[in-house]
């Protein structure tokens, strides 16, 4: 009887421990959802420490603890160093490739960004992490993200005057897109390549070529794409591609009349001898009927 009572007691204690762990995990997840990194660290430290290394529970708790350490403010060499150690432990000891891949990307982000005073940006190391993910997970969405980040980390070198590193970014994206034409990140990849060709490389023809691909697929931020429409129109006119210039001036009038370039686009179309769309928001004040007289004296 005592033997069975002991077994029951063990089961009860085990169930209670599992329940406490699940409750702690729920509280930790809630803290992360609320960007409450200090609280997340408090909950995930014991979960990661008590879980068996390599298990799904350990992987999840360790990853969440790493993210919290990476994001907590104020950041320091200690918090970022702890996050790096935790990410590396996942890479070395977990079989869950979702967390392994994201840990590699996050190590790249740590190398790419300046997280605290005195921190040094290391774009070369960031690119190595991103390239590793893009190669290993080429057919997964995180592979696309990593390739985009790798290319951007080349462009961010801004190594004037020859830009030997910066100019490697756009071709990297174009090669990837040739191999993955339906990539879900195709639009931001083409737009990033176009931006790099535009500045700092000042390669107007290739910039416009990339922007035309974005226009075909769909702009990354349609509601705020007017600056790129204007850029495309001005580049095209500069290159003597007036038909393309007319297309983008027209897009500004039809889709972004309040962008600050509406009237300039009207004038540009007139200068190019192209038809001007009728948009009431851009009507010439001189052609509008006079306003009715005021019914009472205006007061300051």
Image (spheres, rainbow, N blue to C red):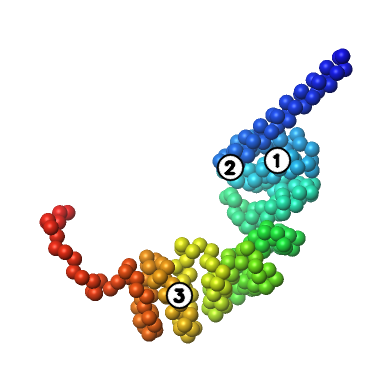
Q: Residue 33, which numbered label?
A: 2
State yes or no: discs 3 and 1 in contact (Cβ < 8 Å): no
Dot 1: within a 10 Å radius of its alpha carbon, few (fewer than 14), some, or many (20 or more) residues?
Answer: many
Mark 3 vs mark 1, foreground winner is 3
**Residue underneath mark 3:** 248
Residue 35 is situated, as x and y percent measured from the top left of the image, at 57, 42
State yes or no: discs 2 and 1 in contact (Cβ < 8 Å): no
Report the residue at 61% width, 63% height from top: 185
CA–CA distance between discs 2 and 1?
A: 15 Å
> Who comes first in sequence, dot 3 or dot 1?
1
- The tally of labels here is 3
Residue 224: in sight, yes or no?
A: yes
Quadrant in the rendering for residue 180? bottom right
Report the residue at 58% width, 66% height from top: 187
Mark 3 vs mark 2, foreground winner is 3
CA–CA distance between discs 3 and 1?
A: 50 Å
State yes or no: discs 3 and 2 in contact (Cβ < 8 Å): no
As helix, strand or loop, the secondary structure at mark 3 comes to: helix
As helix, strand or loop, the secondary structure at mark 2 comes to: helix
Relative placement, left or right, of 298 versus 58 is left
Quadrant in the rendering for residue 59? top right
Relative placement, left or right, of 265 versus 29 is left
Quadrant in the rendering for residue 121? bottom right
Q: Nearer the viewer, residue 118 or 237?
A: 237
CA–CA distance between discs 3 and 2?
A: 41 Å
């Amino acid at each position: 009887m005592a033997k069975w009572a002991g077994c029951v007691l063990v089961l009860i204690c085990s169930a209670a421990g599992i329940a406490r762990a699940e409750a702690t995990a729920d509280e930790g997840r809630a803290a992360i959802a609320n960007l409450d990194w200090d609280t997340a660290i408090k909950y995930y430290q014991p979960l990661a420490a008590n879980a068996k290394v390599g298990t799904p529970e350990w992987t999840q708790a360790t990853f969440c603890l790493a993210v919290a350490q990476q994001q907590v403010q104020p950041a320091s060499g200690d918090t970022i160093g702890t996050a790096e150690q935790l990410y590396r432990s996942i890479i070395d000891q977990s079989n869950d490739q979702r967390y392994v891949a994201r840990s590699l990307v996050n190590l790249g982000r740590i190398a790419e960004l300046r997280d605290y005073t005195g921190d040094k940006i290391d774009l070369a190391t960031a690119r190595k992490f991103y390239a590793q993910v893009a190669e290993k997970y080429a057919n997964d969405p995180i592979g696309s993200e990593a390739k985009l980040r790798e290319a951007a980390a080349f462009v961010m070198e801004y190594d004037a005057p020859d830009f030997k590193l910066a100019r490697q970014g756009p071709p990297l994206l174009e090669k990837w897109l040739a191999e993955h034409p339906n990539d879900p990140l195709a639009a931001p990849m083409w737009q990033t390549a176009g931006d790099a060709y535009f500045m700092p490389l000042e390669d107007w023809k290739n910039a416009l070529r990339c922007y035309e691909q974005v226009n075909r697929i769909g702009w990354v931020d349609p509601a705020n794409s007017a600056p790129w429409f204007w850029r495309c129109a001005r580049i095209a006119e500069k290159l003597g591609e007036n038909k393309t210039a007319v297309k983008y001036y027209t897009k500004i009038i039809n889709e972004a009349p309040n962008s600050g370039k509406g009237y300039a686009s009207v004038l540009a179309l007139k200068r190019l001898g192209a038809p001007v769309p009728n948009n009431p928001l851009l009507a010439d004040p001189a052609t509008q009927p006079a306003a009715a007289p005021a019914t009472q004296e205006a007061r300051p």
